[in-house]
Amino acid sequence: MNEQAESEDRPLVRWARHAVFALFLFATPFVEWTMIQNLRTSLRSNSWPTVEGKVLKSEVAEDTRRGQPVYSADVEYDYAVRGTAYHGAIVRVGNMTTKSRKDAEEIVARFPAGKPVTVHYDQADPSACCLIPGTHWTHYLVVVTPVLFWIMSVGYFHQMWLNRKGRGDHAPARH
């Protein structure tokens, strides 16, 4: 018996594989809902009113994910809506990190500390704000990706069901 077939016969390996796909199957709708809400907010931000604010801090932040450096623009600003002061730190709805330091540097250069800035805010909740309204291609990517995982999980369990049905492993019918 080859090594792959041997590992497939181990109940623990089979159980772990089922658990991973079950997690994808049941968790994906919740992740997808969150990503769709993020996309909807980014689309709505195009029509948000604006006020002038002031950039307080603007620098490139570096972090490590899976042993690789990732970068983001760490921009903070103050603004006021109808006499109430607010503090913001969202450049784009769904702030994304990038593997490119240059991308983060371009945003920092666009919003230098001490300079006035146009702040887009949600009229229903003025604390919800951003500097760059609208969507980015990554908003669509994070909506599509969970769907692919969900389809893969459904396919996995469908194939498992077909295999069991073909072997006659299903429960006997009750009379």
Image (cartoon, rainbow, N blue to C red):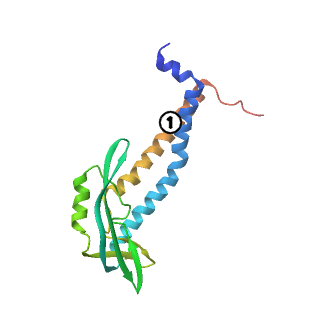
Residue at horizontal 45%, vertical 44%?
Answer: 149
List the residue tagged with mark 1: 156
Residue plotted at (30% across, 76% down)? 54
The reply, left or right, for residue 154 in relation to residue 129 is right
At 25% from the left and 53% from the top, the residue drawn is 101
The relative height of residue 148 versus residue 136 in the rendered view (above or below) is: above
On the image, the x and y values in percent for residue 125 come to 45, 76
Indicate the quadrant containing the C terminus: top left, top right, bottom left or bottom right. top right
Residue closest to the far top? 1
* Residue 96, x across and y down, in percent: 35, 57
Provide residue 170's location: percent of width, then percent of height.
65, 30
Q: Is residue 63 left or right of residue 37?
A: left
Kind of residue sitting beneath label 1: Tyr
- The residue located at (32%, 50%) in the rendering is 70
In the depicted view, which residue is nearer to us: 100 or 20?
100
Are there few (<14), some (14-19), or many (20+) residues within 10 Å of tag 1?
some
Closer to the camera, 63 or 138? 63
Badge 1 marks a residue whose secondary structure is helix
